[in-house]
């Protein structure tokens, strides 16, 4: 079992990374392999809604000049996911949103029926709006949302601050334990013939007549 943790911050070892590392450590302690993938600080294209990824056999994005297709390949091999972002103007940062749009359009089918969670990191406020925005990707893709004992967020202006956010760190630890538990439940279910529902073709209703 492997969980892929996506660091949506431009800072490779900042507050978002610190929170993801706490989850990764807990997962490893519970027998689950982890990998933290940093989206980096290079430009990331936004989705243009061209639909080329739906016609692609590889399941990647038609644009191959940034990190999205590298992430798509990582996604295919993972059993669970954690998506983390810092707060920029009370929402996820722009690069992370661009990554999420293109990732879920082009590789959503590889993530269906797998457990996932989202986390937000902020100095002070905007975490709930960021958490809400990220969770919508999970909720639209037949994924299993992993809970903790509070909303998944940490607070601090630098990693040393996050290390003092004892409640935030506990949330990350509980999230890791719950993710490991859910993965083991899914593995046990599959071993006993319990399989996920078959994905249905989407019915899209246009309200403009």
Image: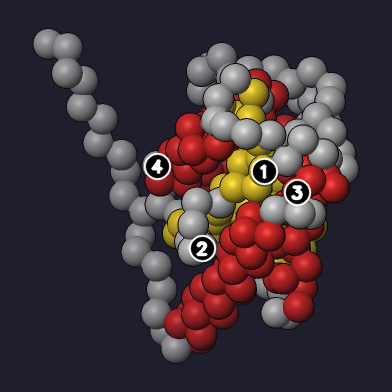
Q: Mark 4 vs mark 1: which is more N-terminal? A: 4
Which of the 4 image quarters holds residue 81?
bottom right
Front: mark 3 or 2: 3
Q: Position of residue 169 (x, y in %)?
A: 68, 59
Where residue 55 appears, as percent x and y from the top left, is 54, 30
How far apart, in angstroms, are the residues tagged by discs 3 and 1?
6 Å
Which element type, helix, strand or loop, lies under badge 3? helix
Of pointers 4 and 3, the one earlier in the residue sequence: 4
- Identify the residue under disc 1: 155
Dot 1, how many residues are within 10 Å of its Cα: few (below 14), some (14-19), or many (20+)?
many
- Decide which of tag 2 and tag 4 comes sooner along the chain: 4
Q: Nearer the viewer, mark 4 or mark 3?
A: 3
Residue located at (62% from left, 34% from top): 124
Provide the secondary structure element on which disc 4 rests: loop
User: Is 108 situated left or right of 8 in this image?
Assistant: left
Tell me the quarter of the image containing the C terminus.
top left
- Mark number displayed over residue 162: 3
Residues 197 and 83: in front is: 83
Residue closest to the eye, 21 or 77: 21
> For the point 76% across and 78% down, which residue is it?
29
In space, the residues marked 2 and 1 are separated at their CA atoms by 16 Å
Task: Say which residue appears at 74% left-offset and 21% top-offset.
Answer: 44
Answer yes or no: do the residues labelled 3 and 1 have beta carbons within 8 Å?
Answer: yes
Q: Is residue 48 left or right of residue 40?
A: left
Q: Which mark is residue 148?
A: 2
Where is residue 118? Give x, y as percent: 57, 48
Residue 111, relative to residue 124: is it above or below? below
**Alpha carbon distance from label 2 to label 4:** 20 Å
Camera-nearest label, 2 or 4 = 2
Residue sitting at the far left = 209
- Give the Cα distance between marks 3 and 2: 18 Å
């Amino acid at each position: 079992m492997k969980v892929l943790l996506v660091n949506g911050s431009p800072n490779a070892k900042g507050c978002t990374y610190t929170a993801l590392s706490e989850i990764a450590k807990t997962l490893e302690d519970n027998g689950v392999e982890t990998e933290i993938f940093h989206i980096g600080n290079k430009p990331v294209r936004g989705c243009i809604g061209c639909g080329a990824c739906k016609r692609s056999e590889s399941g990647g994005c038609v644009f191959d000049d940034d990190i999205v297709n590298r992430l798509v390949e990582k996604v295919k091999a993972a059993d669970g996911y954690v998506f983390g972002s810092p707060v920029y103007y009370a929402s996820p940062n722009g690069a992370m949103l661009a990554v999420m749009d293109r990732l879920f359009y082009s590789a959503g089918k590889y993530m269906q029926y797998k457990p996932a969670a989202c986390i937000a990191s902020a100095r002070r406020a905007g975490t709930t709006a960021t958490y809400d925005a990220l969770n919508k990707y999970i909720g639209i893709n037949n994924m299993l949302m992993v809970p903790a004992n509070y909303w998944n967020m940490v607070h601090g202006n630098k990693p040393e601050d996050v290390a003092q956010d004892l409640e935030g760190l506990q949330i990350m630890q509980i999230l890791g334990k719950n993710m490991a538990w859910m993965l083991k439940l899914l593995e046990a279910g599959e071993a006993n013939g319990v399989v996920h529902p078959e994905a249905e073709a989407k019915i899209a209703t246009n309200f403009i007549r």
